[in-house]
Image: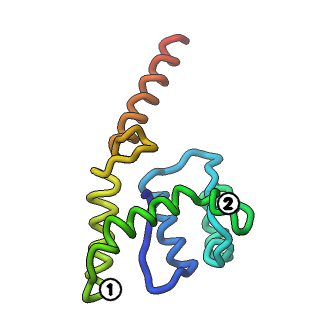
Amino acid sequence: MVGWAMGKRPTADLVVDAFNMAICRRRPWPQLVHHSDHGSQYTSLAFTQRLKEAGIMGSMGSVGDALDNAPAESFYASLQVELLDRRRWRTRDELKLAIFEYVEAFYNRRRRHSALGYQSPEEFERRWEMERESQLEAALTKR
């Protein structure tokens, strides 16, 4: 989970906040494609303008095609089973803190994912970055 935000309603501002977090964390390469569903927050002028400002192309699958959003749906299923179904929270702020801890301390750093060879996303990215740097270094020495 790279960029995320929480609020009472799924608004364009909420999506822009999550997008901005992702941009700050990853500084994406040119020609990145952002894929989403057809929610009004993703088709909003505010979000499409923010995509344009960042030089990122928006992509949307066909309506009703859940396979396009399988990674997001998988995350939400994990969040539901591993956190939300296990207890109740007295306040919205208490729940927000629990979700923050789940995403930032557990899901991204410690939870092993079968799609990543049973590594955490943090470990997978660290190894991927090291491999990328090694390949770049090898390509430069060949010149």
Q: Is residue 143 left or right of residue 90?
A: right
Is 29 situated above or below 90? Answer: above
Where is residue 142 shown, x and y percent of the image? 52, 11
Q: Secondary structure at mark 2?
A: strand
The residue depicted at 48 percent of the width and 68 percent of the height is 18
Query: For the N terminus, which image quadrant?
Result: bottom left
First-in-chain label (2 vs 1): 2
Characterize the local packing of mark 1: few (<14), some (14-19) or many (20 or more) Cα atoms within 10 angstroms. few
* Residue 58, disc: 2
The residue depicted at 70 percent of the width and 68 percent of the height is 64
Cα separation between marks 2 and 1: 31 Å
Where is residue 98 shown, x and y percent of the image? 27, 73
Where is residue 31 shown, x and y percent of the image? 65, 47
Q: What amino acid is labelled 2 in the image?
A: Gly
Query: For the C terminus, which image quadrant?
Result: top right
The residue depicted at 27 percent of the width and 83 percent of the height is 89
Q: Secondary structure at mark 1?
A: helix
Q: Nearer the viewer, residue 79 or 136?
A: 79
Scheme of image coloration:
rainbow
Q: Is residue 112 left or right of residue 137?
A: left
Is 96 situated above or below 28? Answer: below
* Residue 92, disc: 1
Q: What amino acid is labelled 1 in the image?
A: Arg
* Residue 60, disc: none
